[in-house]
Image (cartoon, rainbow, N blue to C red):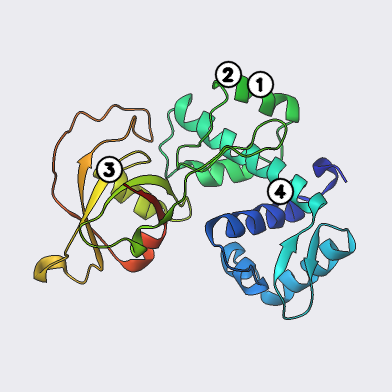
Amino acid sequence: MDVIQLSTNVQDYLKVIWDLEEWDDGPVHPTDIAERTGMKQSTISGALSRMVNAGLVEHKPYGRVGLTSAGRRSAVTMVRRHRLLETFLVEVLGYTWDEVHEEADALEHAVSEKLVDRIDRYLGHPAQDPHGDAIPTESGSMPVVPLTKPLSQAEDGQTVRVWRVSDQDPALLRYLSRHRVRPGTLLKLVSPGDASKGAQVCVRKISAGQSSPNGDEDESNGITEPLELDDAQASRIQVVIQ
């Protein structure tokens, strides 16, 4: 079944399942989908039943949710649309990285594959979107990515490079942007100390990434004031241990 034959709701559910699988190695459950989409559990259960009948997902009552090969192909198509649109909005139209998620959510259902491919070529076939998420190629393959872990699992004293940041928390994106932290930035974990006001993860920026999420160059260099994050915020940042 071609992705254009699917309803917008089904397209959204497939993309959400893909995203949950990509961010968490654990199994995806209906409650995870309900939490991400803001829908009632009963609504998700009904949608999953229809998607099982359509051959898009595998799911048994009270069990995990998995994409079939057909469901995965459609999910990858939607992920490619979404991430290329986010990149276009930032690099061409001047949006900031905290503004683009909802815009791309709305646009991804309306664009044609021809337009998506044109955007891809215009942007030079980017491998990552502004948040660091991998962009599938036209053939549906994924770029090779390094082994990453949540910043919340890194240890004091370690140096890490930011690889990707979840687009689900605009406030966190704005906070990181104010401190000019983005994919590519090097951070060093330090002890929060007594003045951390409850912060569970504390980092200092020791070098900038290649470019900021809105296209500006970062002119700051060297060690800066520490950034204080709670555990939930730190878990939304994937890093590569250096």
Q: In the drawing, what numbered circle is on residue 186?
A: 3
Residue position for label 2: 122
Provide the residue designation for mark 1: 118
The image's mark for residue 75 is 4
SS for tag 1?
A: helix
Q: Is residue 234 left or right of residue 30?
A: left
In this rendering, the answer to whether 48 lies above or below 9 is below
Residue at coordinates 13% horizontally, 49% vertically from top-left? 225
Earlier sequence position, callout 3 versus callout 2: 2
Q: Which of the two discs, 3 and 4, labels the residue nearer the N terminus?
A: 4
Q: Label 3 sits on what residue type? A: Leu
Tell me the kind of residue under disc 4: Ala
Q: Are marks 2 and 1 in contact (CB under 8 Å)?
A: yes
Which numbered disc, 3 or 2, marks the residue closer to the eye? Answer: 3
Residue appearing at x 32%, y 60% in the figure? 154
Residue count near mark 2 (Cα–Cα under 10 Å), binned few <14, some 14–19, many ≥20: few
The alpha-carbon separation of the residues under discs 4 and 2 comes to 23 Å
